[in-house]
Amino acid sequence: MPELPEVETTVRDLRRLIVGRVIAKPGLSFADWPKMLITHPPEVMSQLLGSEEVLAINRRAKYVLVELGHAKFLVFHRKMTGNLFWREHDAPPDRYTHVIIPFVDGSELRFADLRKFGRVYLFLSREEMNQHLAKLGPEPLEDAFTEEIFHQIMTGRKGRLKPLLLNQALVVGLGNIYVNEALFVSGLHPERRAETLSRDDQNRLYQAIRMVLNKAVDNRGTTLSDYMDGEGQKGGNQEHLFVHFRQGEPCGNCGTTIIKTTVGQRGTYLCPQCQPEFKEQGLT
């Protein structure tokens, strides 16, 4: 699934490529999987999109927020295999494209999704959009997300670290890849219980989260199978992962073989030396 770095990379690309463009009429030139369109049927969404100018593009968690004229917001969630990219008017078709939004200059915004789990929303006011996003937690790369804020979030929490960090109501944008990476960088085992963390443990985890996310954004996201950026190109962060998808390889820190296990029904990669089990830390 595209996580925060992949969505952020796409948003930055699309901000450069489509802000200022005007959607043609009809507003949808192709929509062959209506279940993707959550708020309106295709013919209604098409009518509402036509002639609207793209004013801005932003991100909230793993959502792409396209601000249009008349206080409308076109919102995409890519789910597991969705990709959102801009194409020139003469670009050849892309596989698994299910929604196409044409611009008056002939170029297109295409939403492609192998598994068809992606979602498209059209909100007719900022308030309506904010209601949909209201349950999301804080953004981990914003300046307002400080060590103190993270300490407040983690204080009183119970349960294993990995499932907690995947909870989008706690901190947004973290998925399986970057939770695995952040836990490695912070030296914490995925099954360590949150209530056992010291303030120093929390601070290391906070710094690790921000480090692995910023690194992935700098590398334009991680492509392990399906992810492409806003121009339909692969990311580069897969070449710089510490543990994720590296089972059987030596740890870059200590040389111990990286293993794969399952935590919370998710594939989990770790170094057993750098991330000792709970009992090895002398805790009860």
Image (cartoon, grey):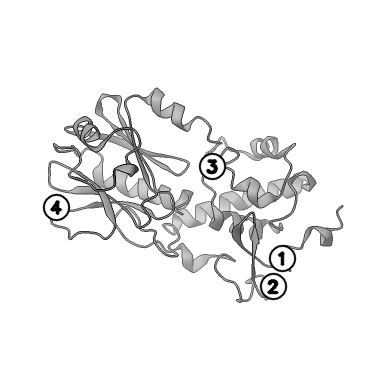
SS for dot 4: loop
Residue at (54, 58) in percent of width and height? 177
Whole-percent x, y for residue 218 in the image = 45, 56
Estimate how packed mark 4 is, as few (under 14), some (14 to 19) or many (20 or more) residues with alpha carbons within 10 Å. Answer: few
Residue at (71, 46) in percent of width and height? 202
Q: Which residue is mark 2?
A: 254
CB atoms of marks 1 and 2 within 8 Å: yes
Whichever of labels 4 and 3 marks the residue nearer the N terminus, that label is 4
Quote the CA–CA distance across marks 3 and 1.
26 Å
Quote the CA–CA distance across marks 1 and 2.
7 Å
Whichever of labels 3 and 1 marks the residue nearer the N terminus, that label is 3
SS for dot 2: loop
Give 282 or 19, whichever is nearer the viewer. Answer: 282
**Front disc: 1 or 4:** 4
CB atoms of marks 3 and 1 within 8 Å: no
Q: Amino acid at mark 2?
A: Cys
Q: Which residue is mark 3?
A: 172
Whichever of labels 3 and 2 marks the residue nearer the N terminus, that label is 3
**Front disc: 3 or 1:** 3
Q: Which residue is mark 4?
A: 89
Whole-percent x, y for residue 265 in the image = 61, 56
Quote the CA–CA distance across marks 3 and 2.
31 Å
Estimate how packed mark 1 is, as few (under 14), some (14 to 19) or many (20 or more) residues with alpha carbons within 10 Å. Answer: many
